[in-house]
Amino acid sequence: MTAEPAAEDRELSTADAIASWRRAYADWSSDQRAFKKVSWGKAMMWIFLVSDTFIFTCFLLSYMTVRMSTTAPWPNPSEVFALTIGGASVPLILIAIMTFVLITSSGTMAIAVNFGYGRDRVRAAALMLATAALGATFVGMQAFEWSKLIAEGVRPWGNPWGAAQFGSSFFMITGFHGTHVTIGVIFLLLLARKTWRGDFDRRRPGFFTGRKGRYEIIEIMGLYWHFV
């Protein structure tokens, strides 16, 4: 008499398990339909940006941890990043200009994406070249900033203004960011050349254009550029 309820319980548990798997599959199928119109390249770029965000977050958390745990005074940014213009020390002027350059490049990239979807390849290519020029300007100013600080004695293991960890934190974070901008400039130049030649319109086989030959790659590049 006790065997029958046990068998029924097993049948119910099996049925429940099958039902739960079916619900999970239905949920997965609905998610698949929701992202069905998202291209593989765009999805992979979003995944890359999320993973890159984790890396940047780790760098910033390590910087905050070092700054809060060190007993030595932390260098004053207004003094470290000041430039002498006309005999007067102007604090943070270079950082302000670099920030303005990057924000401006984000705007030119957004307009390039719009012209790309409008099949205006000349303007799209020109704006991508302008974006690349602004990015190269940023990298050049960062190189100037590095050379200035190195000449003033800033090293990864010490600096003349205070806590020794300042140098390592600064070079690590800004170097990582500068590398991203440099890579973006290179890809912008490649895309601008292909757009200018009309590779997307002719669906010419090659790098970025071999599969679908669409202008969507400009939008994907825009996602990366807005991130950096």
Image (tube, rainbow, N blue to C red):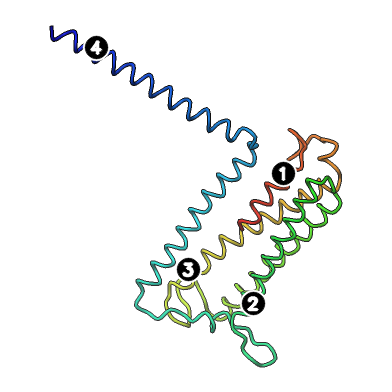
* SS state under label 4: helix
Residue at horizontal 44%, vertical 66%? Answer: 63
Q: CA distance from mark 1 to mark 2?
A: 33 Å
In the image, which disc is placed on residue 8?
A: 4
Q: Is residue 55 left or right of residue 39?
A: left
Residue at horizontal 45%, vertical 72%? Answer: 157
Task: Check disc 1 and report the residue beneath it.
Answer: 217
Q: Where is residue 53 drawn, in percent x and y?
A: 52, 54
Q: CA distance from mark 3 to mark 4?
A: 67 Å
Outermost left residue: 1
Label 1 or label 3, whichever comes before in sequence order: 3
Give the quarter of the figure containing the N terminus. top left
For the residue pair 113 and 181, the one nearer the viewer reads as: 113
Amino acid type for the residue under numbered disc 2: Leu
Label 1 or label 2, whichever comes before in sequence order: 2
Q: Residues within 10 Å of mark 3 (few under 14, many from 20)?
A: some
Q: Is residue 160 left or right of residue 197?
A: left
Task: Check disc 3 and report the residue beneath it.
Answer: 168
Q: Residues within 10 Å of mark 4 (few under 14, many from 20)?
A: few
* SS state under label 2: helix
Label 1 or label 4, whichever comes before in sequence order: 4
Q: CA distance from mark 2 to mark 4?
A: 76 Å
Label 2 or label 4, whichever comes before in sequence order: 4
Residue at horizontal 84%, vertical 39%? Answer: 201
- From the viewer's perspective, is the residue at label 3 or at label 4 nearer? 4
Q: Where is residue 13 drawn, in percent x and y?
A: 29, 18
- From the viewer's perspective, is the residue at label 3 or at label 2 nearer? 2
